[in-house]
Image: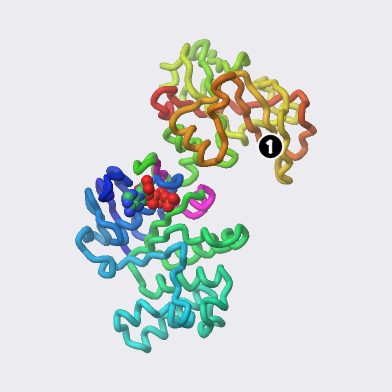
Amino acid sequence: MAQVVLAGVGKVYPDGTRAVDDLNLNIADGEFLVLVGPSGCGKTTALRMVAGLEEISEGTVSVGGRVVNRVPSRDRDVAMVFQSYALYPHLSVRQNIGFGLTLRKVPKAEIRKRVEEAARTLGLEDYLDRRPRNLSGGQRQRVAMGRAIVREPQAFLMDEPLSNLDAKLRVQMRAEIARIQRDLGVTTIYVTHDQTEAMTLGDRVAVMKKGELQQVAPPQELYDRPANLFVAGFIGSPAMNLLQGELTGTAADLRLKIGGQELRVGPEVLERRPALRDYIGRSLVVGIRPEDMEDARLSEATDGNRLTSTAELVEAMGSDVLVHFGLETSTVVTEDTKELARDAGTDVLGTLETPHTVVVARFSPRTQVKVDDAVEVRVDTARLHFFDLETSAAIW
Ligand code: ATP
């Protein structure tokens, strides 16, 4: 077990592509750190540099206090688990799990012991003599994990290890990986583009965009205090609604104008976000999470913080109902949100022409709202997020 430290790590590929820029991460002994971000943000490259599969262009990587920049991959004492499992089809499960140890000329009895221990941890005891092709996807994934476990490395490096599994199995294996990592206490770096996986697995989550680290924090902090628009839009599902608004009034009686409607912002918000004072009388980006809105007709709150509109789409999810309604204000389109929208396959650019934004609220299943109904939405203004329109940074 060991600490893994990335200090000023950068990667420029031979063709000039900068994949990672000045990445600083200090992963504690036994910690589970998740690297997350959209496709192409450089997370795999970062992991491969730690693994020794990619040359480090700038900065240093250390494992257990030893700088490993010049240490070949096999001598780094880290074990990588790939999304493609990379199992040998002609070898049994037992041989696949023990393969790395055989290569290292570990005594046979020791290999047998470690393989059987790993098989127990992974629930693979009954499959040790099977070939990979006679295993389910989840079992293959376990074999790949087994190969990493028997090496007793200082760190596990996992690159989207669940992406070949179906949705149900992913959830199951996610819990397995969390349990195994906790039991073994091995420092782990886990790469994924799936924010749910990141939030449920990580002790801390590092969000990357275009090779740059945006924020690294425990999952709840990332959700409660996203550092910028990119993190705000990336973490949370459905995504945080980002709208243009204007702060008016005074510190004692602060108002937020959104598309011709007005909400009161209580003094506790200014206490928590003192920098917001400088924005009174100015436009900014308002972030409202779908879960911080409710059907005003069912609300017990008496603060009168309501937005009125018409339901454009109502999606019953069983546990809750997503109500989409329009507001006459601009959608905030930054480079970040454009990119997120592209990833999600939607086209936000169309909304630039008309100042009409569709907001998504998560209502309780008790709501009676139907498409085309008038909706009254109560907003929990204590939970609003605010960002600078130009810099995209959170206002605190
Ligand atoms: P994904 O989730 O799609 O795997 P990622 O976040 O892991 O993406 P990387 O695979 O690390 O991203 O790639 C980061 C950037 O580096 C991308 O722009 C990619 O096109 C580029 N890149 C990756 N490998 C090479 C290479 N061998 N030569 C040149 N550019 C590369």
What residue appears at the point 39 percent right and 45 percent down from the top-left corner?
41
Residue 199 lies in the magenta-colored region: yes
Image spot of residue 202 (x, y percent):
46, 53
Image spot of residue 268 (x, y percent):
51, 24
Q: Nearer the viewer, residue 39 or 308?
A: 39
Q: Nearer the viewer, residue 117 or 241?
A: 241
Q: Nearer the viewer, residue 190 or 58?
A: 58
Is 281 on the left-hand or right-hand side of 363? Answer: left
Query: In the rendered image, which residue does mark 1 sit on?
Result: 322
Image spot of residue 312 (x, y percent):
71, 29
Q: Which residues are magenta?
A: 195-209
What residue appears at the point 77 percent right and 37 percent down from the top-left corner?
366
Residue 241 lies in the magenta-colored region: no
13, above or below 103, in the image: above
What residue appears at the point 51 percent right and 25 percent down from the top-left corner?
332
Is 23 on the left-hand or right-hand side of 395? Answer: left
Query: What quarter of the picture does the C terminus occupy?
Result: top left
Image spot of residue 201 (x, y percent):
49, 55
What residue appears at the point 53 percent right and 21 percent down from the top-left corner?
244
Image quadrant where residue 371 sits: top right
Residue 204 visible in the displayed image: no
